[in-house]
Amino acid sequence: MRKANNYAFIDSQNLNLGVLALGWKLDFARFRSYLDFLNQLAIKLGRKK
């Protein structure tokens, strides 16, 4: 059986404008690292193969 791939597209302009509207500044490198961490955690918990 072939392993399915899932991808997420994040519209960075809308994300950036939303974050700025809250008065925050987003560190995109750290955000990417956080998303990778969540992905690895989901794999370890068996929620993703």
Image: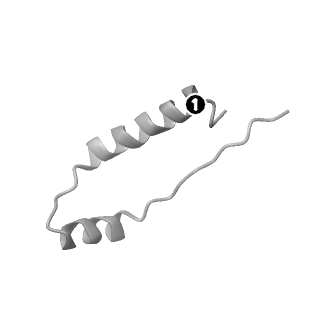
43 lies above or below 16: above
Q: Quadrant of the N terminus?
A: top right
Q: Residue at x 36, y 44 (%)?
A: 32
Residue that carries the numbered disc 1 in the rendered image: 43
Q: Is residue 25 left or right of residue 33?
A: left
Residue at the spot x=28%, y=49% of the render? Answer: 28
| Residue 35 percent location from the top left of the image | 41, 43
What quarter of the picture does the C terminus occupy?
Answer: top right
Amino acid type at circle 1 is: Ile
Residue 40 falls left or right of residue 26: right
Residue that lies at the very extreme toward the left in this rendered image = 23
Q: Quadrant location of residue 20?
A: bottom left
Between residues 12 and 38, which one lies in front from this camera angle? 38
Left/right placement of residue 25 relative to residue 12 reads left
Relative image position of residue 34 (x, y in whole percent): 35, 40
Label 1: few (<14), some (14–19) or many (≥20) C-alpha neighbours in 10 Å: few
Element type where label 1 sits in the image: helix
- Residue shown at 55%/26% (left/top)? 44
The percent position of residue 16, horizontal first and vertical second, equals 27, 65
